Image (cartoon, rainbow, N blue to C red):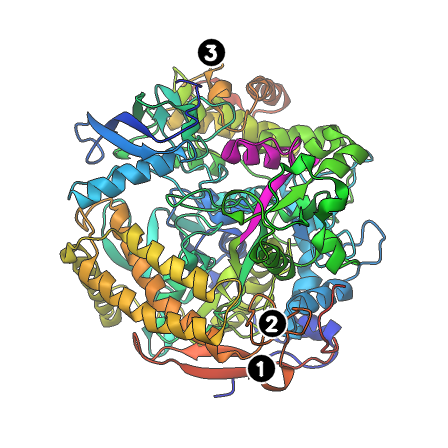
């Protein structure tokens, strides 16, 4: 992508977009022209312009997931010129602005591509597998009520900050889409690290990491082979150190209890 | 009709405890026989579904997004209030209660607000137990900051992502119950009708947004936790999918809609850049802790901000409201900004903006401290505007953000339809005519974790489980109606897109029913909205078909509901001949421009009953009594 900013006037861009009618259907690339785009348009607003034209021409608009359009809900999910979210550092595609492109650019737009994320339509994929990972252990089992006062256990600022660094994950799945193995280890590592670094997350730490790793395998995610593409694509800049933490927590779990043995044995 | 909120009586500090004891319970072994439908998975919905699941109820939960974690609560930045008084600065449950009643401009029920303040402390405990990484000081204790409308520091926060962290806490609790099998999740599913059988809410009709299939889910109680309707202004800080649809469908089935004219305009948003714009972005109110709002003294000032010397700057909030200064409540700060811009002293394109300047704080605390507090907000600002907020003042302008109005509920959060409960932003209960910053998160979680588990049990204890099944004639009728409306939308094949029509409605609403309202502007809106409605049903173009993933169709349905609802909002604003909180009528103000309430005639909640599309709704009143906080002119000077 060009980092050059188009300062004046509007841009015309050539879009090459993945179109797919439904799950399991044959997809194809289609070419569109985006006209009258200003540098202040967000990437999704540029697609809105194209879609409005398609609708008026009686053609089917491009389906894409989006909601908050301020980079926090994690719903938007497009691979732009081969890079999830378009390659601007720490930026979701909804926050990518057209000033990062120049007049006449050709832009390729594709959905997340990963075994665990089947395509539903055009650029929309099913990321239910990420929910499944959380359901399998991404929590502290604190029933509503009956918990101690919030200040009962001091937590060092360093630990709280580390936990927050991990907790910033928005669950968009860009890490999976960027990974050559389609691994969700950054996503899983961030959750495991967030909870394992807090005193209240200790009790379940061994079971949590074991269960989440098993779920990763069952959901069709791959494994980490240290490409670090996930961190580069992550719109929140989640650090790969959390993958290291995930591995450490898993090893610890093996020693601490039998919690991880079923995974380790490949059952 | 005079409505009764059924508030417990007696000394206010005992009301909730007494009421909890008075409510009936459901035997643990019987709980699983009851099915509860929870629509929406934001703070209110996720916390309710998780907690009801933990109690053993059979819960089904629905969201239009692909995952419950994406609900718009996630976007709340600043923080959550609680009366913990950890800083020892004079806070108490009574003070939070008092501030909320006063902040709401005396248009909320005392008992509801008391309960909110009381359970606020439990919320912080619960969230910490779940692993929410709140900000902490170097001793390891929880840190707090100040927010608008309060003189104590009671706002807990997790960087600029408090809503995200609280929602992920509730989502994790929900996920745990999904795994446990007590909650069944239906993502990408939108509620399009409420099923009422023999006067009781017994089900919902939904559309599967992937397959297009319309089906009915029945249950013993329905909880609407579907957020607010501020997208009626088209441009707002809400997510694109936020709509009035769920509560509007319930309204059309008989639920009263209360105080729709109480809409909140947030003072600190990034100004609009162009026609094409699809949404407005909020910059957290917490920025006003360290940023100072100002405009040039001179009209039509052309110098760049940093070249304007101190004596030519007007720090208008500090000037007008010396005791609260930049932390004046939202409605007041928003109108003050508009006033400066109307006076031709606004900055940026079109003069619709004021400066939010961090220069002095950076000088006092250093850029690193400011970065630590608000780093992500500065980054977001730069991504959108291409300007560096550390070097030049940010430009901000008010934008529609939140609604205090919603479906009418009694003290038990139950609407006038038995079995239909409404939680969080979707109800009207605690914020009166204006919500204070960091109170939305508090309300959502209070309703879901700590109130509904008691009140819904009380209702269920008095009713037999499983009375209505999916093959009930009312269900078939409802499915037929929803399918009919879908077919109708697809068959019009006109010349205007859904967005085009929604933008027309939103522009009219913003100009005539927005930050300031007058009798004339409201009458004009009420005249013009039916024409937009007709145009919509004659000339909208929705491509594709209903049996498919069709985002145009989703938007068309939501827009159709917004158009019908907009008329009610305008009517409510016209009927309320006073200014209060977020509702500002130009006819009713003091000489200094402050809102003039009329307690003699309007000290009530207005609950509207639906009488047909385009027909005048019927007004019911719930009088408000103030026994613990003295009714007074709200002053922040």
Q: Which portion, as a residue range, is magenta?
A: B373-398
Question: Under tag 1, what secondary structure?
Answer: helix
Q: Chain of mark 2?
A: B
| Mark 2 and mark 1 residues within 8 Å of each other at the beta carbon | yes
The answer to if B488 sits in the magenta stretch is: no
**Discs 3 and 1 share one subunit:** no
* Vertical relation: B44 (above or below) B9: above
Question: Viewed as shown, does residue B479 lie left or right of B221?
Answer: left
List x then y, in percent, for residue B182: 45, 51
Observer-nearest residue: B177 or B525? B525
Question: Viewed as shown, does residue A74 lie left or right of A148?
Answer: left
Q: Chain of mark 1?
A: B
Q: CA distance from mark 3 to mark 1?
A: 65 Å
Question: Around disc 3, counting alpha carbons within 10 Å, would you say few (fewer than 14), some (14 to 19), or many (20 or more)?
Answer: few
**Discs 2 and 3 share one subunit:** no
Q: Which mark is residue B580?
A: 2
Q: Which of labels 2 and 3 is toward the front?
A: 2
The answer to if B379 sits in the magenta stretch is: yes
Q: Which residue is mark 3?
A: A227
Q: CA distance from mark 2 to mark 3?
A: 58 Å
Q: Which residue is mark 1?
A: B602
């Amino acid at each position: 992508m060009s980092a050059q900013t188009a300062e004046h006037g509007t841009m015309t861009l050539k879009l090459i977009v993945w179109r797919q009618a439904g799950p399991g259907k044959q997809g194809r690339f289609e070419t569109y022209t985006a006209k009258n785009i200003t540098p202040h348009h967000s990437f999704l607003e540029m697609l809105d312009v194209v879609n409005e034209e398609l609708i008026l021409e009686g053609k089917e608009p491009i389906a894409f997931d989006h909601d908050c359009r301020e980079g926090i809900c994690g719903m938007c999910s497009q691979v732009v010129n081969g890079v999830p979210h378009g390659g601007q550092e720490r930026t979701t595609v909804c926050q990518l602005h057209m000033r990062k492109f120049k007049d006449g650019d050709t832009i390729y737009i594709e959905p997340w591509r990963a075994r665990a994320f089947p395509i539903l339509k055009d650029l929309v994929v099913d990321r239910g597998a990420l929910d499944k990972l959380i359901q399998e252990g991404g929590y502290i089992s604190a029933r509503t009520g009956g918990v101690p006062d919030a200040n009962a256990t001091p937590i060092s600022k360093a630990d709280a900050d580390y936990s927050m660094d991990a907790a910033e994950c928005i669950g968009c799945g860009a890490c999976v889409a960027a990974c050559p193995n389609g691994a969700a280890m950054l996503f899983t590592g961030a959750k495991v690290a967030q909870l394992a670094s807090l005193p209240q997350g200790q009790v379940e730490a061994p079971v949590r990491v074991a269960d989440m790793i098993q779920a990763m395998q069952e959901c069709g995610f791959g494994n980490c082979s240290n490409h670090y593409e996930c961190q580069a694509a992550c719109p929140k800049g989640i650090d790969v150190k959390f993958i290291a933490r995930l591995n450490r927590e898993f090893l610890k779990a093996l020693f601490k209890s039998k919690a991880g043995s079923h995974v380790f044995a490949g059952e | 009709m005079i409505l009764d909120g059924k508030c417990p009586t007696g000394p206010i500090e005992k009301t909730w405890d007494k009421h909890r004891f008075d409510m009936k319970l459901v035997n643990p072994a019987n709980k699983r026989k009851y099915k509860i439908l929870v629509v929406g998975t934001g703070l209110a919905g996720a916390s309710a579904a998780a907690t009801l699941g933990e109690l053993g109820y059979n819960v089904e939960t629905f969201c239009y997004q692909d995952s419950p974690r994406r609900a718009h609560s996630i976007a709340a930045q600043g923080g959550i209030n609680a009366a913990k008084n950890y800083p020892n600065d004079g806070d108490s449950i009574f003070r939070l209660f008092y501030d909320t009643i006063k902040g709401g401009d005396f248009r909320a029920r005392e008992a509801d607000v008391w309960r909110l303040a009381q359970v606020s402390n439990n919320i912080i405990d619960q969230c910490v137990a779940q692993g929410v990484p709140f900000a902490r000081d170097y001793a390891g204790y929880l840190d707090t900051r100040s927010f608008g409308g309060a003189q104590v520091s009671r706002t807990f926060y997790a960087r600029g992502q408090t809503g995200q962290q609280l929602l992920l806490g509730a989502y994790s609790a929900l996920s745990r119950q999904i795994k446990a099998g007590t909650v069944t999740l239906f993502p990408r599913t939108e509620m399009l009708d409420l099923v009422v059988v023999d006067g009781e809410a017994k089900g919902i009709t939904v559309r599967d947004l992937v397959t297009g299939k319309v089906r009915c889910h029945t249950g013993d109680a329905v909880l609407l936790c579907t957020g607010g309707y501020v997208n009626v202004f088209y441009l707002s800080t809400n997510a694109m999918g936020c709509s009035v649809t769920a509560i509007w469908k319930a309204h059309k089935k008989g639920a009263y809609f209360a105080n729709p004219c109480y809409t909140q305009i947030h003072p600190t948003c990034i100004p609009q850049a162009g026609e094409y714009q699809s949404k407005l972005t909020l910059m957290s109110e917490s920025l006003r802790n360290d940023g100072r709002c100002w405009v040039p003294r001179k009209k039509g000032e052309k110098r760049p901000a940093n070249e304007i010397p101190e004596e030519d700057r007007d720090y208008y909030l500090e000037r007008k409201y010396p005791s609260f200064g930049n932390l004046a409540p939202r409605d007041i700060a928003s109108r003050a900004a508009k006033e400066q811009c109307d006076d031709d002293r606004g900055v940026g394109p079109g003069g619709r903006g004021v400066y939010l300047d961090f220069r002095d704080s950076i000088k006092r605390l250093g850029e690193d401290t400011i970065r630590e507090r608000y780093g992500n907000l500065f980054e977001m600002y730069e991504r959108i505007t291409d300007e560096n907020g550390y070097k030049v003042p940010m430009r901000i302008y008010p934008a529609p953000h939140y609604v205090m109005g919603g479906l009418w509920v009694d003290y038990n959060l139950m609407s006038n339809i038995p079995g239909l409960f409404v939680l969080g932003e979707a109800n009207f209960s605690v914020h009166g005519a204006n919500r204070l910053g960091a109170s939305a998160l508090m309300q959502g979680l209070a309703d879901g974790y700590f109130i509904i588990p008691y009140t819904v049990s009380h209702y269920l204890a008095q009713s037999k489980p499983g009375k209505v099944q999916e093959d009930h004639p009312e269900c078939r009728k409802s499915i037929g109606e929803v399918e009919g409306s879908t077919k109708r939308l697809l068959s019009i094949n006109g010349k205007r897109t859904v967005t085009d029509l929604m933008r027309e409605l939103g522009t009219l609403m913003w100009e005539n029913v927005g930050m300031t309202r007058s009798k004339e502007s409201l009458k004009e809106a009420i005249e013009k909205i039916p024409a937009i409605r007709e145009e919509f049903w004659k000339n909208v173009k929705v491509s594709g078909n209903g049996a498919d993933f069709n985002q145009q169709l989703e938007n068309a349905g939501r827009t159709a509901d917004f158009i019908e609802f907009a008329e009610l909002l305008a009517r409510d604003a016209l009927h309320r001949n006073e200014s209060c909180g977020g509702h500002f009528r130009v006819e009713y103000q003091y000489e200094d421009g402050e809102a003039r309430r009329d307690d003699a005639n309007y000290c009530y909640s207005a609950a509207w009953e639906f009488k047909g599309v385009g027909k005048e709704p019927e007004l019911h009143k719930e009088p408000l009594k103030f026994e613990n906080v003295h009714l007074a002119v709200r002053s922040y000077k």
